[in-house]
Amino acid sequence: MTPEDSSSYPFDLSLIIVSFNTREVLRESLQSVARERGDLRLEIFVVDNNSHDGSVAMVESEFPEAQVLRSEVNLGFGSANNLALERAQGRFLVLLNSDAFLHPRSLQLALQHMQENPETGLAGGRLVGRDSELQPSARMLPTILSDFLVMSGLAHKYSKSRFFGRFDRTWADPMQPAEVGWVPGAFSIIRPEALRKVGLFDPDFFLYSEEVDLCKRIQNAGYKIMYWPDIVVTHIGGESSRQIKTLAMSSSGAQLIRWSMRSTLLYYRKHHGAKVWLVKMLELTLFRLTSLRNSISSDPQRKERAQVSRNMVRLMQQAWKDTNGGRVSPPRPWSFD
């Protein structure tokens, strides 16, 4: 019996959705799964991260085919997925955000592509908003250079350049499949054999960078990470995040950015060692320069942007302290203090 023998698996796909107080969009996501399952042998898990909005009762009442795994604490994205990944029996594993909805034939196409491409360890599809606008769906692994190009604005200014647009691959035709560095966790399909080689999500990443870390480990094990644009998924999270334009935001919004910075430092320390210090200095320098440039203007909007940059400096310094320079992950669940 070979790993490619699908008859040895009780399910074609194990589909996992992690939810934290997302009852209404979770219902819509599960409805899309029900529409697209067709004749697939489908195992469905919903991992609830200690929600208080009736999500569990809704799933148990309206989608009895789904297995609900409850956590008494918010485990974050990666560790919550691990609860189901440890139990999944499908030939392939599909991760779907609770605010993501499958388009026609998405599951069938994902299964077909993985069967036809045994060298692929993990793959994603084309993410779009409700307005059908393309979202970043296929990225290259982060480097200090790509971070500089994005933060400096050069990646946006010269988005059609292979050099400047390298991180988000803004130069590429989004309708062409490609081998990439990583794909967002809103939708992905994974080969279980790859996870058996590299392990599950690293629990140190409570939120952000967990899928980047997993993709890098899968690549290091000799597998490809692929982007297949004929697999289409609506993801509303991308739409809402575009509405957050500044850091003159709520304290919870600032904390999420602090969490993102923590995860960035953890990722660089794990995979690039002492170079994490360069990441810290790059971000602090760019934020300080932006603050200085805007603070000398009399334009109120530029004054506000200067304050945003000063806040970013403070958050990076806090994140560095929180993680001891990327060496340790704060105790989970990460809190808003």
Image (cartoon, rainbow, N blue to C red):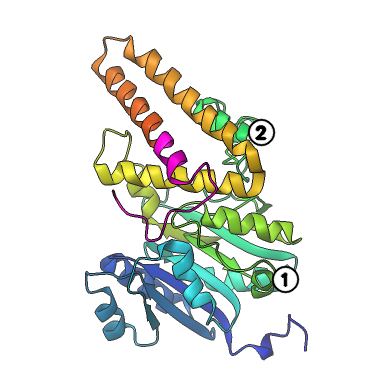
Residue 336 percent coordinates (x, y):
29, 50
Residue 159, quarter of the rendered image: top right
Q: Tell me what residue is drawn at x 39 percent, y 43 percent.
A: 258
* Residue 328: in magenta span: yes
Residue 298, quarter of the rendered image: top left
Q: Of the residues shown, which amino acid type is indicated by label 1?
A: Glu
Residue 301 percent coordinates (x, y):
27, 20
Residue 94 percent coordinates (x, y):
53, 71
Is the residue 290 above or below the residue 36 in the image?
above
Q: CA distance from mark 1 to mark 2?
A: 29 Å
Q: Tell me what residue is drawn at x 61 percent, y 73 percent.
A: 111
185 with respect to 241 (left or right): right
Is the residue 235 above or below the residue 324 in the image?
below
Q: Tell me what residue is drawn at x 47 percent, y 67 percent.
A: 79
Looking at marks 1 and 2 on the same chain, the residue that comes earlier in the sequence is marked by 1
Is the residue 248 above or below the residue 87 in the image?
above
* Residue 121: in magenta span: no
Q: Magenta stretch: give its range.
A: 316-336
The chief SS type of the magenta part is loop
For the question of whether residue 306 can be seen, the reply is yes
336 with respect to 176 (left or right): left
188 with respect to 9 (left or right): left
Please tell me whether mark 1 sits on a helix, a strand or a loop. helix
Residue 278, quarter of the rendered image: top right
Name the residue that disc number 2 marks: 162
Q: Tell me what residue is drawn at x 43 percent, y 35 percent.
A: 316
For the question of whether residue 166 can be seen, the reply is no
Q: Of the residues shown, which amino acid type is indicated by label 2?
A: Arg
User: In front: 239, or 218?
Assistant: 218
Tell me if mark 1 has few (under 14), some (14-19) or many (20+) residues whose alpha carbon lies within 10 angstroms of its own.
few
Query: Which label was assigned to residue 116?
Result: 1
140 with respect to 288 (left or right): right
